[in-house]
Every structure is written in structure tokens, then in C-alpha cells.
Amino acid sequence: MAKITIPVVTPSLNELLNMNRHARTRLKKSYMAHIEGAVHDMKMTVNKLKRPKRRRLRIWSFRKRLLDPDNFIGGTKPLTDALKDLGLIWDDSTEYISFGAEQFPDKYDPRTEVFIEEIK
């Protein structure tokens, strides 16, 4: 299992819907940069996919203020898209990932942790 820590929290779905497409693209690119840095630091313990494979994806968000569940889940879309574009998951459909997301209060160290593991 690989654990990737991103030093920012995902936006809420409401915030995401209020962004223009350029801001959403910048957000996804910033996630990609954070993820690439974390993967590099782990010395590639996460294998990029060359062919379709099913993976378990868990996103934990440690944030100052908790969101309602649908607002939280919807805000994770740019992060899953970044993981897909980097080849860490094949696609964000349920055919290729088992998805779960949780949020926890942490006003002193807001961050997002992503766990990726292969499903045998």
C-alpha cells in the first residue's frame, strides 16, 4: 500500500462548482505536482499502470471544519483525475477502483492523505 500526503485539503463541491475551468485545471495540476513529489520521495513504491488494473483508493481529509458528505465527496474529483492522469489509477470508474473517503477534524495540520493499493 502506498500513502501519499498532500499538504492541502480538497475544496468543497460548492467551491469547485464556483471555479472557472482554468482555476480547476490549475488545481488539478497542483495536485499532480504534490503527488509526483510524494511519489518521488517514496522512491516509486507506487507502480504506474501500463494496463487496466483494479485498485483500492482511500482519501482521508484532515480539515479545520468538516463538510457535509456529498459536498466533501464531490470536491475530491480533481484529485482522482490527477491520480488518473499520472497513471496511479487506470480510471475513476467503479470498474477500476474501490473508492472510499473520510474526513477528520484537525485544525492544526490540515492535509489530505491518499492510500492506493492493488486489489488482487
Image: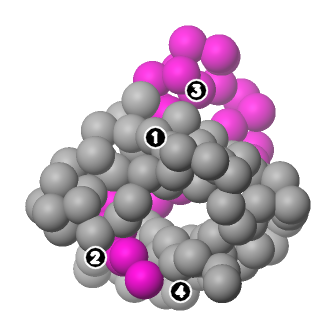
- Marks 1 and 4, how far apart in space? 26 Å
Residue at image mark 1: 86
Name which of mark 2 and mark 1 comes first in the sequence.
Answer: 1
Q: Is residue 31 rendered to the left or right of residue 98?
A: left
Magenta span of residues: 1-28
Tell me the SS state at disc 3: helix
Instruction: Report the residue at 39% width, 60% height from top.
Output: 47
Residue 82 visible here = no
Query: Mark 2 and mark 1: span between their CA atoms?
Result: 26 Å
Q: Position of residue 80 (x, y in %)?
A: 61, 50
Whether pointer 2 and pointer 1 mark residues with C-beta atoms closer than 8 Å, the reply is no
The colour scheme is one colour
* Of pointers 3 and 2, the one earlier in the residue sequence: 3
Amino acid, disc 4? Phe
Q: Which mark is residue 109?
A: 2
The numbered mark, 2 or 4, whose residue comes first in the sequence reads 4
Q: Is residue 15 above or below residue 106?
A: above
User: In screen coordinates, is 112 left or right of 6?
Assistant: right
Q: Amino acid at mark 1?
A: Leu
User: Does the stretch in magenta take in 4?
Assistant: yes
State the separation of the CA atoms marked 3 and 1.
Answer: 17 Å
